[in-house]
Image (cartoon, rainbow, N blue to C red):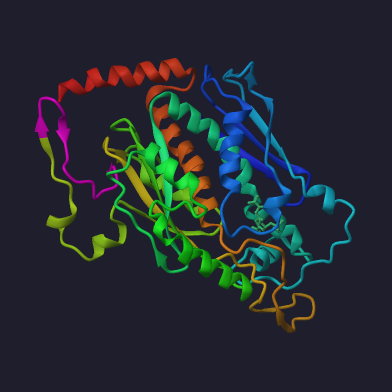
Amino acid sequence: MIPFNYITSGQSHGKGLVVVISNVPAGVRIDDDYINFQLSRRQRGYGRGGRMSIEKDEIEIIGGIINGETTGSPISLVIKNKDYENWKNKEVEPVTRPRPSHADLVGGIKYRRRDLRDVLERSSARETAIRVAGGAIARKILEDIGIKIGSFVDLIGGIECRVEHFSFSVEEIQKITDESPFRLLDRSKEDKIKELVDKAKIEGDTLGGSFTVVIDNVPVGIGSFTIPEYKLDANIAFSMLSIQAIKSIEFGIGYEYGYKSGKYVHDQIFYNNDKGFYRKTNYAGGIEGGMANGQRIYFRCYMKPIPTLMSPLLSVDIDTKESFEAIKERSDIMAVPAASVVAENVVAIDILRAIMYRYGFDHIEIIKDGIKNDFRRFEWL
Ligand code: EPS
């Protein structure tokens, strides 16, 4: 039995997107507005293409939530694609010139599609809209038990905007980044980044970057070292790499582990009667041995530049086998801010799953009681 088990379906320019989620605890109050707010956060950001002015993503709840409360039954949600109206009677040319770095070519070989549109319709990042909708439910459950998630963009097209985030609460991070068109915590770099994105647009180019996700108040001991599939960091890495265009992830100080010796990178352990066990540093990113250690969880994800270029790279036509430029499609120039919102809502699922494995599946109050009682259990230490 997999907690918060979900599957999505739908294409970028089809009628809409669907998610079905089983094993969601009952007793959680949630409404359309909560989910729609997360959807609107994902749609914002400078660098998106024309599609975002067509869509205004809104959820329709089909099952599993009655009078604003989860019932324990599978939840199903739908988002209609507004752009479908423009596509349904349109003569669409088959796609035969795959974009380098997109799923087009390999997907076509694998599923034997002569029209690569069959591949790109599903591999499109449009699918992240419905994942955010599903993830928003997990996020609401976490909020009800005091867990907070935020994110900020820290690199776009080579412009670094890293910030030491420990002095910011998650609420502060959310407030600042939600007001920034690039979701920056250090907003001083906005003009420089805007220039770079505008230049990429003129040159028919695209940009990638990175973002950091921070999560506070995760209970000690969720996740497990005992079985690879239970490791919290491994599960988060899986989810993050499943988000379109995310190519790498690092926890805590990440790549710096390769540059410094052990005595500079491990978080020493202290104890006093007030705090119990505590650390003065958090290099590990809040996870040790695949388990949350009670500190802030933080990790950074890197996103590649979007493969759809208006000045396309070389490709081969799958029909003629001749060298051509790859197809040009309307697309985004830079979507790192949107990806950070997707990551926030998707990681909520991983945290919630680990919590449900420890504290139960059936009702939010059972989970809350479990967490409360754990504080007593930890006294044996
Ligand atoms: C995408 C291409 C663009 C993006 C889309 C992802 O869509 P279109 O081809 O319709 O212009 O806007 O992202 C979304 C629609 C979204 O909701 O995020 C792609 O090829 O991945």
Q: Where, by quadrant of the figure, is residue 368 drawn?
A: top left
Of 134 and 116, nearer the camera is: 134
- Residue 34 image offset from top left, x and y in percent: 57, 30
| Residue 85 shows in this picture | yes
Q: Is residue 95 above or below residue 49?
A: below
Q: Quadrant of the C terminus?
A: top left
Q: Main secondary structure of the magenta part?
A: loop
- Residue 266 image offset from top left, x and y in percent: 18, 51
Q: Is residue 58 above or below residue 379?
A: below
Of 237 and 30, nearer the camera is: 30
| Residue 231 shows in this picture | no
Q: Is residue 323 left or right of residue 254?
A: right
Q: Residue at 41% across / 20% down in the picture?
A: 367
Of 192 and 379, nearer the camera is: 192
Q: Is residue 358 magenta?
A: no
Q: Residue at 31% across / 48% down in the picture?
A: 165
What is the span of residues highlighted in magenta in the rendered image? 271-290
Q: Is residue 277 magenta?
A: yes
Q: Residue at 68% across / 37% down in the picture?
A: 58
Q: Is residue 252 left or right of residue 340?
A: left
Q: How many marks?
A: 0
Quadrant of picture, ligand 1: bottom right
Q: Where, by quadrant of the figure, is residue 217 drawn?
A: top left
- Residue 47 image offset from top left, x and y in percent: 58, 60
